[in-house]
Amino acid sequence: MPADVSKRNEESFVHMQGVTKHYGGVVALDGVNIDIMPGEAVCLAGENGSGKSTLIKILAGVEQPTSGSLKIGQNTQSPLDPRTSAAAGVMVIYQDFSLFPNLTVAENIAFASELGNGTRLASKSRNLQLAKAALQKIDVDIPVHARVESLPVAHKQLVAICRALASNARLIIMDEPTTALTEREVTSLLGIIRRLKEDGIAVLFVSHKLAEVLEVCETVLVLRNGKLVAEGPAGDFDAASLTRHMTGRDVPQTPPSAMSEAATDLLKVNGLHKEGAFKGINFTLRGGEVLGISGLLGSGRTSLAKALFGLVRPDSGSVTLSGTPVRLGDPLAATQAGIGYVPEDRLTEGLFLTQSIVRNVAVGRLDAHANKGILNLTSLTAEATEWLKRLTVKAPDVEAAVKSLSGGNQQRVALARWLSRAPQVLILNGPSVGVDVGSKSDIHTIIRELAEQGIGIIVISDDLPELLSVSHRILVMRNGQLVDEIASGTVDERELTHRLAS
Amino acid sequence: MKSVFNKQFWTRNETLVAVVIILFCLIASASDPRFLSATTLTDLLRASIVLGIFAIGAMLVLISGGIDVSFTAIAVFAMYVATVLTLGTIPSLPWYLIFTLSILIGAALGALNGLFIARFGLPTLIVTLGTLSLFRGFLLTFVGSERISKLPPGMRDFSRSMLARGTTESGNFYALPLAFAALVFVVVLTWFILHKTMLGRSIFAIGGSEESARRIGINVRATQFFVYVYVGALAGLAGIIHGSLGRMADPFSLVGLELSVIAAVVLGGARLTGGYGTVSGTLLGVALIVLVQNSLIVIGIPSTWQSVAIGLLILIGTGLPAWQAKRAAEQAA
Amino acid sequence: MRILASPEWRLAIITVAVFALMAALSPERFLSEGNLVSMAFQFPEFAILALAMTLTMMTGGIDLSVIGVANLSAVVAATLLASFAPAGIGTVESLPWLALAYTSALIVGATAGAINGLLVARLALPPILATLGSGLVFTGFAVALTGGSAVMGFPESVAWLGNSRLFGIPVPLIVFTLLAYALHFLLTRTSFGLRATLYGANPLAALYAAIDTSKLLLRVYVISGALAAVAGLVIMSRANSAKADYGSSYLLLAVLIAVLGGVNPYGGRGRVIGVVLAVLSMQILSSGLNMLQVSNFARELIWGALLIVVMLINTVDWSERRSKQPEVQGKVTGESS
């Protein structure tokens, strides 16, 4: 329901009219009209798959609209390319920050600006000047001579923000910006935004996290399936209405059914400690339980997950599965013991994109179908195909490369691989990232079914509605420690956000 | 005031190489007191000219994130063609014009590399393996395969020009050729480009993250193209110096040196993955390789073990940092 | 044309075309039995090296030490033979020494491969550097063992491997065919081969899929080393001597054949049949050029040019593997995550 906000085209910094983008047969954006005024903080909310990234790419000049027009500032018209977009003052801070790990903080901050000036000679003193000025603006202290690769993630993001500031941006687009910041830094970021607005710099937040959306912005735009379905002042929206717009339906936050009393302790984690990552981790996972773990990026939750699977070696502590200790720091040992791990980044960590769907599923079961190393390809393929069917993966040709599948189906392939090993414990890191809405709820159903079969599941996620809907319990991590434990059904999303950040 | 000599200093490639060099010289001078003399020094400096110019070029390529093994073929091609052309057209051409010719030919060949790598994005090791054969094969098939010992007088004059010469107290003769100034010039020029120009910083940036470089608007293709043209020009210079100092245009020479050059650069701390490399480190690496190639016998190791020595140096020189990096990665979360 | 989409089919067409071209240019000599048989004797030595290169390339690595390993293995075998079973000794007497020499060569090759494997797997050295350095060391040992000169003086039985026929078929060809089939089987029908391919496709995902990457890489390089040793023995048999610098041009040739054969140097893709076709093409080209009295130098030129041309053609296939950005997913669903 579009709110009644009048925008005057002549005054707006960004004027997007009827922008549509097709990728082959897929419609990524459909007739989108957006106006961003100078000095306005706008939130672009939408689920994964709603078209947010495409919109960013079009604003940055990386992609061109199939139809429609885009005007930036007074003089710049579509079609754009990255240089003209940047020259017009559009700066994007991507999720990976796009920094140079081998260069210093100062140089990273100053680079784009120096490049834009067309100066031929490099000057360390100018770099320092620009860097210090930008850092001062956001009141942050980072060693300017340090190499970026040595910085923690949160600092890297701040460097990226400084770079945009140093480049005289008129519009800063931040893609999921607050995931790495502590509450203090978020507050400071809000202060920066205010100062930017006073300078007439607009900010576009792209996010799927509802709470920060409402807190930070004046105007909210909601995308769903490529269409702009809602727009208006932030005050007009609340968590429920945002969810409704983003998903197109009311997603009831029904917690899972209570666990049976007979459930036994499955995974016992005791005193797990890793310098610089996590400390004093103790918890127990019961059979059939879905345990959610959340925390801000940098809280140590991914390190913990990796440690449980052996990809990270803890300094001390123990992990016991059904009474048997699991050798730490060895993924093979963890796998043999019955622990499975579906990683965060499906594309670079989880799947072999160029290899066939069958191979991606079957990789965990090679020894089971091999006789002295020689594979029985028939039975291997048959079993993999069976799992694909069970998880309803839509794949007409199982020998096709897995990259041809959609995000939701790819995630199912990753799940199938581990499920075919009949694990006792399954750790899912960000299970529905990059997955369309329909598949997301299917995956949640799968998680619930697996739990009912007695598998212990740990879900790591910063998608709070997701956690609330699948977990029996939620553990909160901060600065490497478990600081809070929440039983399902006792909190709502707003409360959960608060407890995460406080 | 924090000491410069902290733990990081001692584990840096450059420091380790410097230590090995010092040890080498100590052992050498202990076993042969004549080792530490002006003669040895000038001989070693002379031997490091061609290797050094090659190494600076190879370092530049590594910083940009690629690897080039064709520079020796470019060098010998440029040298031979420049010599043949001069002899065939204006034999009395002064040396600096012959040199310019060789540099230009080298740059042109480098541009071919640049075309394949920057424009078409082909994998650098394999492409330059291909152009190595292409250039050398072309040279030997279509230009000539004779060793020419009657060089143009310009080149002869150059080889006779000395920066410094004299006799030591013990009566030994020493001489540092003018060509050494070329190495110095190349070092200074390259250092300037890398550290004082946006072009050079862009080369580091591309080596650090090509995608990020693209995103902030660096013209990655043009920069990479420049790198290969520059390296080609350097190779042309190295080749013609080699021909002049050796008093012969031998189309079969130089190829085979690539390994020593890469060894020198890698020992000096340049990383194969790109984004890292220092001029000082490269020079130290060159010094060590030159020592090994020329003076192994002085510390009692027969020269048949030369390959083994260089191979071991590569393995240890890159293995140590790799092992450290692995340890660090395991400690990390 | 769908046929042109598969590198192996493209290659088959190229092989036939080159054969036809050479046959057309010098029909009597090229198509003679003598020539065809002679080709069958010549190519196995570098073809086996190409097989070694293929395996390491499948894992996204490369083995620049194959020549060094081949020569070192041959030198060790040759030194044994020259010392204990010199020329003039009877064939039957020489057999146990022959067996010992061949076994030693294989052990040397496998050990060299193990060293490479340890450097790559345990130290996480990039394969280029590891095998560059180790190749120098292996060659260096061969130089030290021989003083730089050739080792000669073998019993007649040595010549069997590289120069005689079994049921009319040249023995080196039989050896190559067996090894090629074995590699094909290894890559497509064993869990080891599948893991090697997957590792090459995405080493990080292989770690997350609980593949024992250390053991895998070690095995890969050991096999590569052993294959190099076999190649070294064939060279030794055909040259009737062993030297530290034989076959130096074979390194480029091995890489060329692997790349021409459709092996993706970034890893994860390649088929032995492609490599076999590439080998045949190279041999036909080489023999044909010889007949046309084209100089050896031109051969280098053509190989270099061919390598680049093939890569240009294959560029589209590879750029997807190389790119770390999940651009492709975006194209399907409309955006990335």
Image (cartoon, coloured by chain):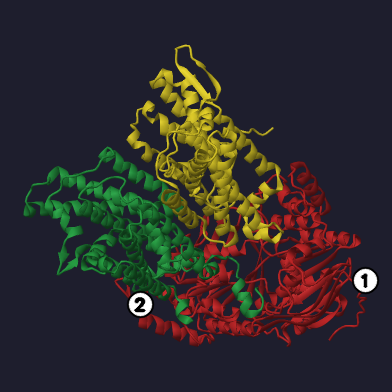
Horizontal and vertical percent for residue B182? 58, 33
Between C208 and B233, the one lying in front of the other is B233
For the C terminus of chain A, which image quadrant?
bottom right
Up/down of A22 relative to B261, above or below: below
Task: Give the amino acid at mark 1.
Answer: Glu
Task: Give the amino acid at mark 2.
Answer: His
Distance of label 1 from label 2 (alpha carbons): 67 Å
Horizontal and vertical percent for residue A160? 73, 57
Per the image, label 2 sits on a secondary structure element best described as: helix
Per the image, label 1 sits on a secondary structure element best described as: loop
* Residue visible at 38% across and 26% down in the picture: B298
> Which colour denotes chain B?
yellow
Horizontal and vertical percent for residue B194? 65, 44
Residue identified by numbered label 2: A369
* Residue visible at 66% across and 34% down in the picture: B2
Residue C199, picture quadrant: bottom left
Q: Is residue C122 visible?
A: no
> Which colour denotes chain C?
green
Q: Chain of mark 1?
A: A
Q: Chain of mark 2?
A: A
- Do pointers 1 and 2 mark residues of a single chain? yes
Horizontal and vertical percent for residue C317? 51, 70
> Which colour denotes chain A?
red
Between B161 and B177, the one lying in front of the other is B161
Q: Earlier in the sequence, mark 1 or mark 2?
A: 1
Residue identified by numbered label 1: A11
